[in-house]
Image: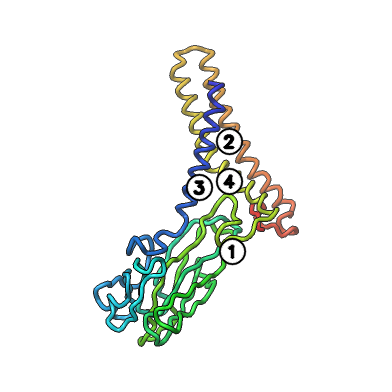
Amino acid sequence: MKKLLPLIVLSVFLLSLFYAEEVNAAGCLSNGDFESGNTGFSSDYTYAPGSSLLPEGAYAVVNDPKSVHPFATSFGDRTTGSGLMLVANGAASPGLAVWSQSVSVNPSTDYTFTGWVASWTSAALATLEIRVNGTTVGTVTAPSTSGIWEQFTVSWNSGVSNSADIEIVDTNLALDGNDFALDDLSFPCPSLVPCGGTGQPACNLCHIFVLIKNILDVFLFPIVPIIAALLIAIGGFMLFAAAGNPANLGKAKTIFFATIIGLFIIYGSFVFISMLLTSLGVLSWTGLGTWWQITC
């Protein structure tokens, strides 16, 4: 058992890293190119693909705006020219999100949200606010020429947040015109190293410490409880199989106590350091705030 334990711990560690990256990958936008249809996102608008997008505040996911409105300019999606896009008739009521989605993020990390917008009529151009967690981070005006795709980009720092609720809200409440399309929305996946990727800052020395912190986060939270549960299960099996053998009973008890003491040391040290720095006033006079966060 002693020979197998390091192999078990290493296997759990590697599987947990793989699991963490899979979870991070799931944090990217779902169906940002709308090729899967009306799924993967939320909308305060009414989904009305067969109603000529009337009244205002209706949307559809189609391959040509003219297929749902007789007066729309005919054009293809931004991705391939023959795929799907979201087309909307801007709402007359304020605060309605035409598109929204929640994603996981790493704290203290810069993110870039990008997308493409087009107008399918030329009157009263849509004015789109990009909001993250209720705060406006950018404003985009739809193109003045119908059927032309234009890219928009907004930046946001996650601060202490672990999630981002992204919304696109049309603040133009005009009844005439105010018609637009969206396609190829993109938001980078959180990663162990939040730099060097698309929409991410260039890597520097600071990001080495961010990498160490993120690995520790993966180890302390997903991995340690799994290893602890595994060791307790092993100890329970050994206790059951001991059949009164004092030597085997001793080994089982050792595993139990060692696991409990290990958990106490790992998580107790975090609490102790936090309490110590707080009581000494280090967090206030250094401006660190949350000492376990690193901002590059």
State the image coordinates of residue 14 (x, y, percent, origin top left).
Answer: 53, 37
Q: Farthest front residue?
A: 81
Residue 157: image tag:
1
Residue contact between numbered discs 1 and 4, judged by CB atoms under 8 Å: no
Mark 4 vs mark 2: which is more N-terminal? Answer: 4
The image position of residue 250, as x and y in percent, is: 55, 17
**Residue identifier under label 3:** 21
Circle 4: is it few (<14), some (14-19), or many (20+) Cα within 10 Å? some
Give the distance between the C-alpha atoms of the residues marked 1 and 4, in whole angstroms.
Answer: 19 Å
Q: Earlier in the sequence, mark 1 or mark 4?
A: 1
Identify residue for label 2.
Answer: 263
The secondary element bearing badge 2 is classed as: helix
Q: How is the image coloured?
A: rainbow
What residue is shown at x 62% (from left), y 40% (from top)?
268
* Pointer 3 with pointer 1, Cβ within 8 A: no
Other residues around mark 2 within 10 Å, as few (<14) / some (14–19) / many (≥20): some
In front of the other: label 1 or label 2?
A: 1
Amino acid type of the residue that numbered disc 2 sits on in the rendered structure: Leu
4 and 247: which one is in front?
A: 4
The alpha-carbon separation of the residues under discs 4 and 2 comes to 15 Å
Q: Which circle's residue, 1 or 2, is located before the other in the chain?
A: 1
Going from the N terminus, do you reach mark 4 or mark 3 first?
A: 3
**Callouts 4 and 3 close, C-beta under 8 Å:** no
Amino acid at circle 1? Asn
Residue type of the residue flagged with mark 3: Glu
Relative to 3, residue 247 above or below: above
- Amino acid type of the residue that numbered disc 4 sits on in the rendered structure: Asp
User: Does dot 1 land on a helix, a strand or a loop?
Assistant: strand
Q: Quadrant of the C terminus?
A: bottom right
Q: Pinpoint residue 48: horizontal percent, then vertical percent.
A: 28, 72
* First along the sequence among labels 3 and 1: 3
